[in-house]
Amino acid sequence: MEMIIGGAFQGKSTYAEKYYPEIRWSLGSSVSEDELYRAEGILGFHEFIRREMRAGKDVKGLAGKLIEKNPDVILVSDEVGYGVVPVDSFDRAYREAVGRICTELASFSTRVTRVVCGIGTVIKHA
C-alpha cells in the first residue's frame, strides 16, 4: 500500500497520475465498497469515508478491511485535520474518522508521500 496525502488543492491527484500512469484510478466520491477492495488506485479516498458516514455506515473497521482485502492499493487523500475545528458535529466526526483511518493505513503503507504545491516529499519509505 502507498499513500499520497496533503491539503486540499495541492496537486495530489496530478502528482499521483504523473508518477503512476499505469494505474487505473477510481474516485473515492463514487467508488463502491466492493470496488474499493479491488481498485488499483483511489483518488479522493477521504470522499469515500465522507459518503459512507453520510449514509450512516460505521467506518471504524475500514482500515483493517482495506489492509486485508487490498494491500497493494495506492490511496490519495486530503489531510482534513488542520485548521479550525468544525462547529458541525458530523464534520468533527468525519475529520476524526479520516485522521484515524489514514493514520492506521500510513503505518501499514510502505510509502507515504506528502504533496504541497504539487511537489511530493516522501515522508515514509519502508
Image (cartoon, grey):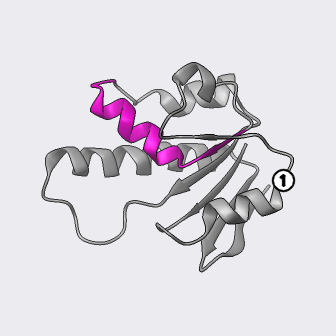
100 on left or right of 13: left
**Label 1 amino acid?**
Pro
Number of numbered tags placed on the structure image: 1
Residue 100 in the magenta stretch? The answer is no
Decide which of 90, 42 is in the foreground and name it: 42
Question: How dense is the environment of label 1, judged by Cα within 10 Å: few (below 14), some, or many (20 and up)?
Answer: few
> Mark 1 falls on what kind of element?
loop
Query: Is 103 rendered above or below residue 54?
Result: below
Residue sitting farthest toward the top = 34
- 82 shown above or below 116: above
Give the image quarter of residue 94.
top left
The residue at 53%/45% (across/down) is: 45
Split into 4 quadrants, where in the image is the N terminus?
Answer: top right
Q: Quadrant of the C terminus?
A: bottom right
Residue drawn at the location 84% of the way across and 53% of the way down: 21
Q: On the image, numbered disc 1 is attached to which residue?
A: 21
Most extreme residue toward the right is 22
Q: Is residue 25 left or right of residue 102?
A: right
What span is colored magenta in the figure?
Answer: 41-57
x then y, percent, for residue 2: 72, 49
Residue occupying image coordinates x 53% and y 34%: 63
| Residue 18: % across, % down | 79, 63
The x, y position of residue 47, in whole percent, is 44, 44
Image spot of residue 30 (x, y percent): 50, 34
> Is 11 situated above or below 112?
below
Confirm whether the magenta stretch covers residue 51. Answer: yes
Up/down of 38 relative to 96, above or below: above
- Classify residue 28 as left or right of residue 93: right
Residue at 33% in and 49% down: 96
